[in-house]
Amino acid sequence: MIELRAVSKDYNGHRVIDTVSLKVETGERVALFGPSGCGKSTVLHLIAGLVIPDAGDILIDGEFVATAHKNLREPQERGIGLVFQDLALWPHMTVSENIAFGLRAKGIPQAEREERVREMVGLVRLGDYLNARPAELSGGQQQRVALARALALRPRIVLMDEPLSTLDEELNLQLRQEILRLHGELKFTLVYVTHSRDEAAALATRIVYFRQGRLDTTPRTGRTA
C-alpha cells in the first residue's frame, strides 16, 4: 500500500502540492487525472523518492519512506519501477542491454540477468528484437522496452507518467491493453498519471482527480477518489 499523509511540496515559493492525503491499496490501479500543471506528476515523483516533501509523510507498505525535508528510503530502496513520457532509453544499447541495465546496477548475477531479460522480452513480445537499438524500433516497441526495463526488477509498485501521450491513437490503444495484461500477470500496484480521460477510464480501477495541487473532491458520476 502507498500512503501520503498531508503531503505538501513547494518550488521557488510556489506550492505545487498542498496537503494531499491519499491511499493506494496493494494491487490497485489508480489514475491521477487532471490538467497539465495541477501537480499530479509531482505526486508521482514524491512516491518514487525523486522529490522530497516539504511537509507530511509518505509510507509504503506501512513503512515511512519520506517525511518533511528528508528521504528515509532512497528511490532504489522502495521497490518501484518507473516509466516516464521521456523513455530515456540508452541509444547505444540494444534492447537486451537496455532491459538489463537496472539489473546490472543492482548487482544481479549475469545468469539471472539473462534469464530475466528473456522473461521480460517474452512478456512484452519483443523476442525478435533483442539485438536492435532504440532507433530501429517503432514508438510502440520503444515503449515496450521501457516497460520491460521497469518490470525486470520485479517491482511491487509501478509508476507511469503520461507514457502513452506521444503515441498515435492505434498504438495508444494497443499499449493500454499491454499494460492491463502485464498488470494481470504480475500483480503490481499501478499509479498512472494522465490528462486523458479515456486513458484514465481504461486503465484505472479508481480515478483520483487533481486541481491546482489538491485533490479535487467535487462530486462526479463514475469512479472518483
Image (spheres, grey):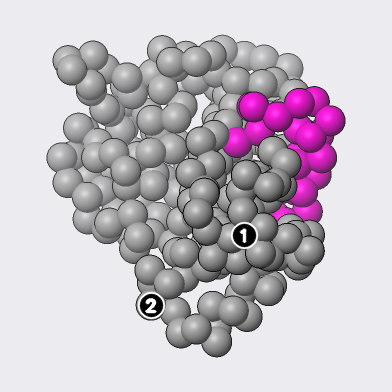
Label 1, label 2: how far apart the Cα atoms are: 19 Å
Viewer-side residue, 168 vs 184: 168
Measuring from the top left, give residue 150's x and y in whole percent.
Answer: 54, 56
Q: Work out whether mark 1 precedes mark 2 in sequence or the reverse, and give the earlier one.
A: 1
Write the residue at 66% across / 21% down: 196
> Does dot 2 land on a helix, a strand or a loop?
loop
User: Residue 61's image quarter?
Assistant: bottom left
Measuring from the top left, give residue 188's x and y in whole percent.
Answer: 61, 58
Q: Which residue is mark 1?
A: 95
Relative height, residue 215 to residue 118 (above, below): above
Q: How many marks?
A: 2
- The reply to whether residue 117 is in sight is yes
Judge the density around disc 2: few (<14), some (14-19), many (≥20) Cα neighbours within 10 Å: few
Residue 95 is inside the magenta segment: no
Q: Which mark is residue 109?
A: none
Relative height, residue 117 to residue 187 (above, below): below
Q: Nearer the viewer, mark 1 or mark 2?
A: 1
Three-letter code for the amino acid on which mark 2 is drawn: Gly
User: Residue 170's image quarter?
Assistant: top right
Three-letter code for the amino acid on which mark 1 is drawn: Val
Viewer-side residue, 42 vs 118: 118
> Does dot 1 land on a helix, a strand or a loop?
helix
Relative height, residue 180 to residue 121 (above, below): above
Write the residue at 54% across / 65% down: 97
Write the residue at 68% across / 47% down: 136
Region in magenta: 163-184
The main secondary structure of the magenta stretch is helix
User: Residue 185's image quarter?
Assistant: bottom right
Query: 80 left or right of 190?
Result: left
Dot 1 and dot 2 residues touching (CB under 8 Å): no
Q: Which residue is mark 2?
A: 107
